Image: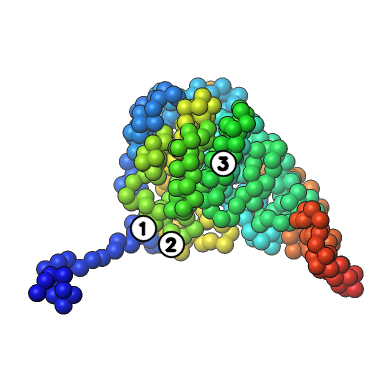
Amino acid sequence: MSDKDPKVTRANRPVLALHVPEPHLRPGDAPDFSAIVIPAAGSAPRPRTDAPAADTHSLATNLVRVLGDDHRAVGPWDPKIDPEILRKMLRDMVTVRIFDDRMYRAQRQGKTSFYMKCSGEEAIAIATAAAMDRADMHFPTYRQQGLLIARGYPLTTMMCQIYSNGGDPLKGRQLPIMYSDKAHGFFSISGNLGTQFPQAVGWAMAAAIKGDHRIAMGWIGDGATAEGDFHSAMTFAAVYNVPVILAVVNNQWAISSFSGIAGAERATFAQRAVGYGIASLRVDGNDALAVYAAVQWASERARANAGPTMIEFFTYRAEGHSTSDDPSGYRPVNEGKAWPLGDPLERLKAHLIALGQWDEERHSTLVAHCDAEVRAAQKEAEKLGILPQQGKDNIASMFDDVYADIPWHIAEQRDAALAEAKDR
């Protein structure tokens, strides 16, 4: 009988099996990050910004770090930032953390339906904003609120969007925290993860076609690298040498699945760029100076038409995915406090102190000032109402900004809604 005959047994062949990634630790276990290899600060080489993409690919498995254990900046990636800029970055990071805490509390008090914090990741957005031009466009996810705060977007307006009240420029048409503001280079946040990459690539292609000087930056998390949009964007970015920066914020967890589900067991996320011939950097996302240096490098590369760059920001989501998530159900309690790369805010503060440009007294004053500023903004926002109070007034506005000319059947629905509201 032929061995192609289905009746032939193949007992000597191994049984096929699948590998299902599982996190190394679960609730009840003690936090343990000993398996993570952390290179010494300053040890990663810094290629020229116009270097061939292949010259960067060793950095896809390395880790760009600037701040050493003594809180001093070392190595070729040291961006030598002016202390005044560092103090501005620290102030913005403190503001973001306080803002997050106030809005998290507001959600727990029933003032809004939903909130997402970026605790432990503040340096990524804040340092990026400092390193890029004000006119550049960002296509963010929901943990880059620091981009808006660093660019001076009003805190009260952000809160009004969270409350969906009369001060919400989006008129309640987006989920809380899904901001949008063209003037501040902040594209509408999409809940469909992965879309930010092709959108950023397309915008940057249009900028190049128009002969513009602005570049774009797309943002996704580690989980969204498993989406098809990721690969489509990488293909276009590589083929057309698009002036774009593509950021993957690897905070170890999607909503409740760890990064191994998206492929982190096999390779770093920065290594995804190697197969596309795109420059790649893997960066300590809790080191504000390393983030600044990497984004500055990628920006210069894009503006010189030397090609796109993908940056993996290696960090940790210190708290839940959102107010709808309880991380104690899938990972050890207080694991974030054991993260070996530390707290980004405390690291920047310690660096400024080491430079003689900061001290504990000034820091306490800064925290008090930022806290007062956030509280005052919240008070102003709540004068216009909180989320549970919305939906009864100006019902007809839901039909605005949808059609240039409202179709007759939509007009009928609008009129019926107005009549019903009037009768209540």
Image mark for residue 23: 1
Kind of residue indicated by mark 2 = Tyr
Nearest-to-viewer mark from 3 and 1: 3
Which residue is more in the foreground, 254 or 418? 418
Does 106 sit left or right of 236 as displayed?
right
Is residue 122 positioned above or below 214 on the image?
below
- Which type of secondary structure does the marked residue at label 3 adopt? helix
Q: Marks 3/1: CA distance?
A: 36 Å
Check if mark 2's residue and mark 1's residue have beta carbons within 8 Å. yes
Label whose residue precedes the other's in the sequence (2 or 3): 3
What percent of the width, then of the height, locates residue 7?
16, 77
Is residue 55 positioned above or below 255 on the image?
above
- Which type of secondary structure does the marked residue at label 2 adopt? loop
Examine the image and state in which quarter residue 174 appears: bottom right
Number of residues whose C-alpha sits closer than 10 Å to that of mark 1, classed few (under 14), some (14–19) or many (20 or more): some
Label 2 sits on residue = 330
What percent of the width, then of the height, locates residue 99?
65, 46
Query: Residue at image x 59%, y 32%?
Result: 209
Label whose residue precedes the other's in the sequence (3 or 1): 1
Label 3 sits on residue = 202
Query: Residue at image x 39%, y 36%?
Result: 277
